[in-house]
Image (spheres, helix red, strand yellow):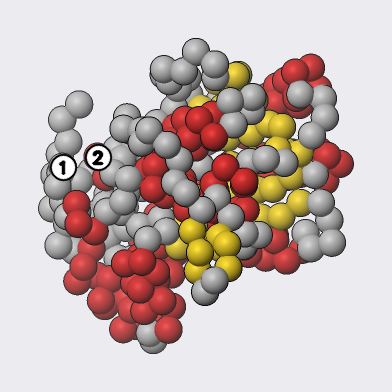
């Protein structure tokens, strides 16, 4: 999911205690990394990963892969932008080479955090708005993530690091009217969990982040009116990133951001698939489909 400008708090949140155990802070999540490679950092959750990461670690280096460069007001930000279309294999191959060159030249040592954030959706009866849109969605949401991760994983194994893959609460049950998107995020979730298990004993781990509705431009691109999803059900991109960094610091393999989303994800996971699909159809079907003006 991708989005808009955030309002920063004056100070990062204080450490919290759960069951008398100290919960690692988002700041602690970034202490061992020297560089962050992220896709889709020009807006939304991806942009918030960069903004918040730089706020927590001013010396951290960032390398963003997206079509357009992020516009971030931070004079101390160490950001390298590599123009990349995550839907095109040749563009990913070129960007991966550029990432390796950047890291060798600018950040030759230290652990690397790879954040696969790029993704988009569509709302309506398949194949609305058109089949090309759905195929491009699979290219970006699934193949692009696997391609880039596969190309950079040898370097992460060598230097140590972690992988954050942004999935969705849509991954926990079939999602009528967003069928391709939900299925693509189910792949992201299950692939990330399996990858993390395979990486045990190495210097790399994987974390699947599953946000629910987030205050971003995701719904606009999917073809929904502003306000189609109630604000009470959503979170800000900053909140999603905060919880993602906290989960990373805790060594978790999966995090569903927000207590409301955790309840819905749990219900979608344990309910019979046909029932979960019927309920999802009733909920998602209430979204107002519209032509979005540019």
User: What is the CA distance from the residue labelled 2 to the residue labelled 1?
Assistant: 7 Å
Residue 99 figure quarter: top right
* Name of the residue lying farthest toward the bottom: 272
Q: Residues within 10 Å of mark 1 (few under 14, many from 20)?
A: few
Give the quarter of the figure containing the N terminus: top left
Look at mark 1 in the image and give the residue it sits on.
Answer: 226
- Residue 187, percent across and down? 54, 60
Residue 258 figure quarter: bottom left
The disc, 2 or 1, on the residue closer to the chain's N-terminal end is: 2
Look at the picture and state if 94 lies above or below 143: above
- Residue 114, percent across and down? 64, 40
Give the quarter of the figure containing the C terminus: top left
**Front position in the image: 3 or 287:** 3
Q: Residue at x 57, y 42 (%)?
A: 27
The local secondary structure at tag 1 comes to loop
The local secondary structure at tag 2 comes to helix
Q: Residues within 10 Å of mark 2 (few under 14, many from 20)?
A: many
**Front position in the image: 61 or 29:** 29
Pointer 2 and pointer 1: residues touching (CB < 8 Å)?
yes
Instruction: Note whether residue 216 is visible.
Output: yes
**Mark number for residue 220?**
2
- Residue 289, percent across and down? 15, 50
Q: Residue at x 83, y 39 (%)?
A: 159
- Residue 133, percent across and down? 37, 42
**Mark number for residue 174?**
none
């Amino acid at each position: 999911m991708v989005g808009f400008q955030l309002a920063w708090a004056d100070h990062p949140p204080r450490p919290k205690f759960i069951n008398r155990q100290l919960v690692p802070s988002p700041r602690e999540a970034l202490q061992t990394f020297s560089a962050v490679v992220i896709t889709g950092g020009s807006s939304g959750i991806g942009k918030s990963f960069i903004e918040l990461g730089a706020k927590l670690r001013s010396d951290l280096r960032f390398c963003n892969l997206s079509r357009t460069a992020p516009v971030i007001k931070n004079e101390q930000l160490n950001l390298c932008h590599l123009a990349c279309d995550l839907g095109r294999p040749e563009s990913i191959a070129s960007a991966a080479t550029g990432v390796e060159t950047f890291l060798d030249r600018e950040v030759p040592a230290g652990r690397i955090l790879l954040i696969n954030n790029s993704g988009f959706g569509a709302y309506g009866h398949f194949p609305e708005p058109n089949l090309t849109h759905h195929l491009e969605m699979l290219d970006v949401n699934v193949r692009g993530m696997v391609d880039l991760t596969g190309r950079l994983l040898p370097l992460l194994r060598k230097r140590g690091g972690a992988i954050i893959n942004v999935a969705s609460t849509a991954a926990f049950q079939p999602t009528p009217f967003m069928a391709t998107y939900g299925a693509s995020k189910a792949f992201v979730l299950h692939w990330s969990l399996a990858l993390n298990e395979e990486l045990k004993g190495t210097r790399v781990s994987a974390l699947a982040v599953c946000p629910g509705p987030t205050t971003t431009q995701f719904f606009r691109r999917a073809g929904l009116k502003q306000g189609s999803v109630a604000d009470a059900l959503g979170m800000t991109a900053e909140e999603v990133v905060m919880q993602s960094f906290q989960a990373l610091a805790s060594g978790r393999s999966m995090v569903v951001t927000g207590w409301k989303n955790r309840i819905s994800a749990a219900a979608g996971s344990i309910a019979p698939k046909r029932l979960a699909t019927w309920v999802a159809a009733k909920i998602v079907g209430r979204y107002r489909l519209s032509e979005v003006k540019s």
